[in-house]
Image (spheres, rainbow, N blue to C red):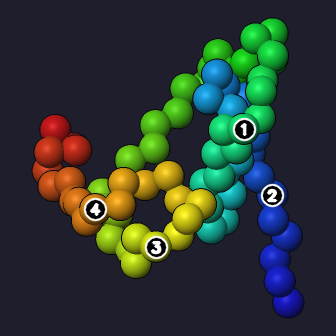
Amino acid sequence: MLGRVSYKVRLSEAGMHLFDRNTGLNILLDEVAVPPAQVSRAPRYLSVALTNACELRSSYCYAPKHAAMLEADRVVG
C-alpha cells in the first residue's frame, strides 16, 4: 500500500517550495510567481546537498552539471 504524500509548502521570492518530510523530496517551482504579500518570512529554511552525485542527465534538474562534493566537517563547522 502506498503512503499518503503530504507536502509542507513555503512561498518565497524564489517561487513555491514543496517538501515531503517522509521521503525528503524537495521541489522548487521557480516558475510560480508569488505575490509579495504571500511570501513566507519565517520559518527560514536551509537546504544542503553534501554531494550532487547522480547521473547528471536530468534536463529538469537545477543542480550543476559537474560532479562535486562538500566535506561534511566543513559543513558542520
Q: What residue type is labelled 4?
A: His
Check whether the beta carbons of the residues at disc 2 and disc 3 lie within 8 A of each other: no
Q: Quadrant of the C terminus?
A: top left
**Mark 2 or mark 3: whose residue is earlier in sequence:** 2
Q: In this view, does 21 lie above or below 36?
A: below
Mark 1 burial class by Cα count in 10 Å: few <14, some 14-19, many 20+ = few
Q: Which residue shows up at 59% across the image and 60% down it?
A: 60
Question: Residue 9 in the image: x percent, y percent?
Answer: 75, 40
Check whether the beta carbons of the residues at disc 3 and disc 1 lie within 8 A of each other: no
Mark pair 1, 4: CA separation: 24 Å
Q: Which residue shows up at 85% across the image and 70% down it?
A: 4
Q: What residue type is labelled 2?
A: Ser
Q: Nearer the viewer, residue 59 or 50?
A: 59
Q: Residue furthest top?
A: 37
Mark 4 burial class by Cα count in 10 Å: few <14, some 14-19, many 20+ = few
Residue wearing tag 2: 6
Q: Nearer the viewer, mark 2 or mark 4?
A: 4
Q: Nearer the viewer, mark 1 or mark 2?
A: 1
Numbered mark located on residue 31 in the image = 1
Q: Which of 55 and 2 is in front in this view?
A: 55
Q: Which of 36 and 7 is in front in this view?
A: 36
Check whether the beta carbons of the residues at disc 3 and disc 4 lie within 8 A of each other: no
**Mark 3 or mark 4: whose residue is earlier in sequence:** 3
Check whether the beta carbons of the residues at disc 1 and disc 2 lie within 8 A of each other: no
Residue wearing tag 4: 66
Question: Residue 34 in the image: x percent, y percent?
Answer: 78, 23
Element class at badge 1: loop
Q: What residue type is labelled 1?
A: Glu
Check whether the beta carbons of the residues at disc 2 and disc 4 lie within 8 A of each other: no
Element class at badge 4: loop
